[in-house]
Amino acid sequence: MSVGVQVVARQDAVIGAPMAGRLSAFPLRDGDRFAQGDVVARFVCAQVEGMVARSKATLNKKQQQLGIAAKLRQLGTNNVAEYGLAAAEVTEAQADLTIAMASADNCTVTAPFAGRVGNTMTRANEFVAAGAPLLELIGDQEQELELILPSRWLVWLHPGVGFAVNIQETGQAYQAEIVRLSGKVDSVSQSIKAYGKVLGSQSGLLPGMSGQATLTPPAP
């Protein structure tokens, strides 16, 4: 029996802006390839960088004051309360630096996996709001095949079952196998979603391609 099949990416994500601000760099375009960890967006962050520098300077000053307080305590010229206050101010300065550095981390957005750009929603020098979509990233290291199959096939359908696939866009035939089944059956259509993988080279396959899959039930 032949059923429709669609190529889908195992990894895909729409990357949102982690902060509000103006983009100083937005290097990727639709279709560009990228590696895991590549910069996909960078914000103008002079103010945030200034906050980090100020927090570091404040922490350094508080640590020096704590060192002086510790020496005076050893000499018996200040009390425990004064030393405790100096220690608390160091802890507070460390917390402020942690917050500032967390904000600075949002200034640069990196790719969580390798792949290709599926779509872009903005461009360099534009101002974006926090949470606004920036671009869609699609992992192209491994594609999956998505099929909708009759639920009555569950008596024999399981991971490892092989099938043939013809993809319309490439005009090629591939051998594939079922890798997993959905956790529920659609009660209206009495169908279940199944996922397969191409055995061998996936060269030329892109998410969104479609075709026909041929599965043969075992002989009774």
Image (cartoon, grey):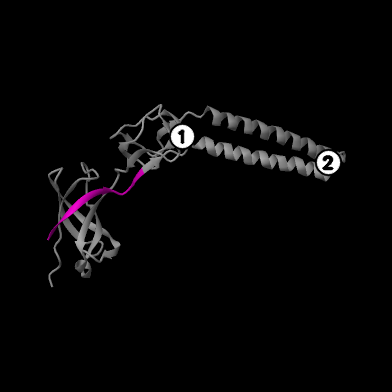
Q: Provide residue 105's location: percent of width, then percent of height.
A: 50, 37
Q: Provide residue 17's location: percent of width, then percent of height.
A: 43, 38
- Residue at image position (61%, 37%) is 97
The stretch in magenta equals 1-13
Magenta residues: mostly which secondary structure?
Answer: strand
Q: Are marks 1 and 2 in contact (CB under 8 Å)?
A: no
- Answer left or right for 133 relative to 54: left
Q: Which mark is residue 108?
A: 1
Q: Residues within 10 Å of mark 2 (few under 14, many from 20)?
A: some
- Residue at image position (53%, 27%) is 46
Q: Which residue does the numbered mark 2 point to in the structure image? A: 73
- In the rendered picture of this protein, how many numbered marks are placed on residues? 2
**Comes first in the chain, label 1 or label 2:** 2
Kind of residue sitting beneath label 2: Arg
Kind of residue sitting beneath label 1: Thr
Q: Secondary structure at mark 2?
A: helix
